[in-house]
């Protein structure tokens, strides 16, 4: 390896730091001193090695940083701050190959898991969230990692991640834990590990049902679940049916009707994926949209009873846009007749004596009709399809 001038500077500074080792200081002062040394490792020495593209030197500095963390930093608050520094620095690196990055990330994961097992370590949660972003960058593989007695196989890494998320119950942080379960499920999907991905989804549903009670948090959580499930392609028919059934069921149980409606029509995307080999179940898509339409009708009736006037037609227009989306994508179950009927329903609602004027809904509907006109003018096969819709 060719010696870079920056390497000599780094080694010189390192020698100076360790030549002033404060052996006679009190344990607390020693901890502070070693923490400062750790910051120097990460902020100065390592960054220089990374910028100079010196992987062996950068790896050595990270190894020394872990040794300092493990042997010399005993204060719990300093440990949390230190793991923040380590993870943050590792996130910014681009010098490591797959093997070295896997080794370092595995170590950071282990130390974070130990911190999360301490009930008073609330700040460790935030280090944990950054760590999961880092783990998503891993090219997880089977086999031994250099310098590791315990190989970091995909199964072991995901087991460790699961333990870390379970440890969040000490904080507690159920919403963050749910997000991390879903991130792990997506990572397992990328690694083609169906049982692992299914287990993480199962844990996410359990957490949703038992720990997330706030109605607004439930809305956010169910949309996160739907979006993550939509992006997965690892599941067989049985497992996917089970998960989509749960997602649809929870969507229909949200507290407010508008939230129910939006979550249910979002579930339609679970049955129609645009990828070449994606799922395309037109019948179940139509069932979701019809169910969303029934919920929207119920919301209008409730508004009429409560206020003496019907609410805005926004939900109907949103559903109309979903119908148009699937119609354009070639779903045979979505016909021009169904779209025509929905347009007439919206016009009737808007002209009703009990209708509440709403400029936003009116503009939304007008834009949707303009889109239909635009598609008609395009000509070709798509233009012919849209010409069957009368507006």
Image: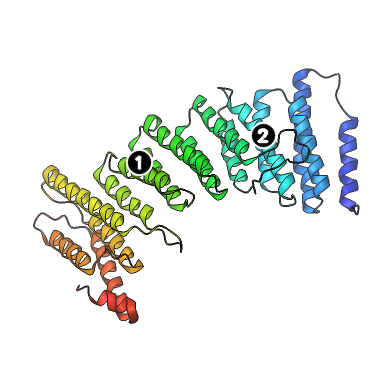
Residue matched to label 1: 246
Relative side of 381 to 89, left or right: left
Distance between the alpha carbons at the discs numbered 2 and 1: 37 Å
Q: Is residue 36 left or right of residue 346?
A: right
Q: Position of residue 202 (x, y in %)?
A: 44, 37
Q: Tell whether 284 sits left or right of 124.
A: left
Q: Which disc, if any, is residue 83? A: 2
**Residue 332 at x, y percent in the picture:** 29, 66
Q: Is residue 277 above or below residue 223?
A: below
In the image, what residue occupies the spot 69% across and 43% down? Answer: 102
> Residue shown at 15%/51% (left/top)?
310
Which one is in front in this view, the residue at disc 2 or the one at disc 1? 1
Q: Nearer the viewer, residue 122 or 241?
A: 241
Q: Is 347 drawn above or below residue 42 in the view shown?
A: below
Q: Which mark is residue 124?
A: none
- The image shows residue 8, relative to residue 344, as above or below, that is above
- Element type where label 1 sits in the image: helix
């Amino acid at each position: 390896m060719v010696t870079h001038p920056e390497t000599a500077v780094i080694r010189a500074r390192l020698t100076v730091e360790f030549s002033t080792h404060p052996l006679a200081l009190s344990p607390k002062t020693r901890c502070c001193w070693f923490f400062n040394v750790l910051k120097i490792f990460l902020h100065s020495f390592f960054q220089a090695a990374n910028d100079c593209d010196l992987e062996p030197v950068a790896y050595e500095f990270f190894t020394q940083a872990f040794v300092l963390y493990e042997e010399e930093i005993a204060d719990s608050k300093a440990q949390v701050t230190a793991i923040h520094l380590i993870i943050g620095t590792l996130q910014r690196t681009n010098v490591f190959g797959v093997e070295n990055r896997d080794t370092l990330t595995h170590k950071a994961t282990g130390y974070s898991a130990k911190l999360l097992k301490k009930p008073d370590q609330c700040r460790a949660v935030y280090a944990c969230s950054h760590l999961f972003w880092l783990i998503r960058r891993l090219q997880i593989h089977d086999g031994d990692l250099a310098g590791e007695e315990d190989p970091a196989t995909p199964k072991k890494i995901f087991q460790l991640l699961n333990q870390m998320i379970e440890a969040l119950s000490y904080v507690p942080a159920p919403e963050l834990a749910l997000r991390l379960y879903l991130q792990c499920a997506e990572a397992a999907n990328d690694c083609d590990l169906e049982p692992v991905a299914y287990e993480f989804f199962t844990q996410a549903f359990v957490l949703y049902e038992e720990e997330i009670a706030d109605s607004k948090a439930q809305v956010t959580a169910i949309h996160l679940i739907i979006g993550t499930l939509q992006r997965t392609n690892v599941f067989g028919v049985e497992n996917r049916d089970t998960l989509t059934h749960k997602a649809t069921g929870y969507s229909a149980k949200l507290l407010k009707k508008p939230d129910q409606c939006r979550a249910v029509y979002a579930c339609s995307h679970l049955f129609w994926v645009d990828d070449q080999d994606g799922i395309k179940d037109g019948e179940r898509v139509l069932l979701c949209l019809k169910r969303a339409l029934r919920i929207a009708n119920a919301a209008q009736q409730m508004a009429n009873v409560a206020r003496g006037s019907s609410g805005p037609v926004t939900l109907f227009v949103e559903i109309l846009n979903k119908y148009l989306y699937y119609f354009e994508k070639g779903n045979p179950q979505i016909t021009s007749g169904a779209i025509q009927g929905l347009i007439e329903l919206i016009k009737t609602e808007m002209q009703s004596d009990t209708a509440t004027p709403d400029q936003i809904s009116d503009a939304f509907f007008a834009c949707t009709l303009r889109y239909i006109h635009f598609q008609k003018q395009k000509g070709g096969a798509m233009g012919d399809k849209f010409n069957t819709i009368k507006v």
